[in-house]
Image (cartoon, grey):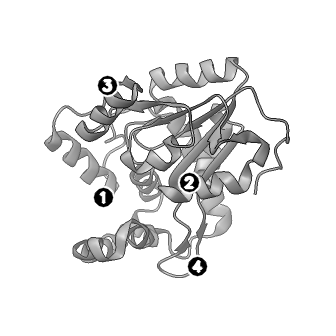
Amino acid sequence: MPDPLSPTPPKGVALFDLDGTLIAWDCQLLFRHFVLRREPWRGVFLPLFLAFLPLAGLLGSEGMKRVFLSFLWRIHPDTLSQYAREFAQSLTPGIYQEMHICIDREHAKGHLLILTSASPELYVVEIGKLLGFDLAIGTPVEFGPLFPDIDNNKGLAKVTRLKQLLPPSYFEDGKLHNSRAYTDSRADLPMIALCETATVVNPSKELTALAAESDWKIMRPARPWRTRAGFALRAMALLLGIGSNPAGIKMGS
């Protein structure tokens, strides 16, 4: 749990999503590749995940995330913490330069910077520290069973968590004062509703249309794939732990 924030409202608030917003990829795939390159034997859990894919509609994103994270079964907590720190250090060079500029601009304005992601909190917090965020929130994960217990920080859950962590004085008429949300996903519409305006990153057709109607800013930083097939090949390599950098982004050592 982060330290309590000052009850005095900041000059402004900037809420940033992580996956697909600050970086091209879902960080869960990147973290899996990171771990498998160090412990290749953990790839044995892939057939289990694939076996559950036909049940994705029934299990939902939270259930499938629990299955996906089975590859970390019985990993030592100290090892996991070390991996989280090292992963964050390797990841930050891959952040879109355009988004670095946005972060720096919000920081220069004296705004409170909050990173809020559905990715596991264990490395979201580490990424937030390195990027200079005042607060970083992710999905809490309790490892132990094969399918770890999680509290998926996605959609409306992001709003619930923010209202738990931020002082009531930060809100006025249900919105954060002088606030902007940055996201790539329609799943973050509840988070956007907390803010006075938004910037959408590489949005879908539906989100692009909504941005035009709502006068939100649209950013389209270059992704490391050009076609769906290219994306699929890179994603499969990440899933299998193949190659030194199948993500095709700048990564630290």
Q: Is 128 situated left or right of 57 in this image? A: right
Q: Which residue is identified by label 4?
A: 144
| Residue 91 screen position, x and y as percent | 51, 38
Looking at marks 2 and 3 on the same chain, the residue that comes earlier in the sequence is marked by 2
Q: Which residue is identified by label 1?
A: 240
Looking at marks 2 and 4 on the same chain, the residue that comes earlier in the sequence is marked by 4
Looking at marks 3 and 1 on the same chain, the residue that comes earlier in the sequence is marked by 3
Splitting the image into 4 quarters, where does residue 112 fall?
Answer: top right
Which residue is painted at 37% across and 46% down in the image?
186
At mark 4, the secondary structure is loop
Say above or below: 149 vs 235. below
Quick check: can you spot residue 253? no
Looking at marks 2 and 1 on the same chain, the residue that comes earlier in the sequence is marked by 2
What's the CA distance linking mark 2 and mark 3?
Answer: 27 Å
Of marks 2 and 1, the one in the foreground: 2
> Amino acid type of disc 3?
Ala
> Amino acid type of disc 2?
Lys
Splitting the image into 4 quarters, where does residue 88 fall?
Answer: top right
> Amino acid type of disc 1?
Leu
Q: Is 109 situated left or right of 7 in this image? A: left
What's the CA distance linking mark 1 and mark 4?
Answer: 23 Å
Q: Which residue is identified by label 2?
A: 158
> Amino acid type of disc 4?
Gly
Of marks 2 and 3, the one in the foreground: 2
- The image's mark for residue 222 is 3
At mark 2, the secondary structure is helix
What's the CA distance linking mark 2 and mark 1?
Answer: 30 Å
| Residue 175 screen position, x and y as percent | 62, 41
Total number of numbered discs in the rendering: 4
| Quadrant containing the N terminus in the rendered view | bottom right
Of marks 2 and 4, the one in the foreground: 2
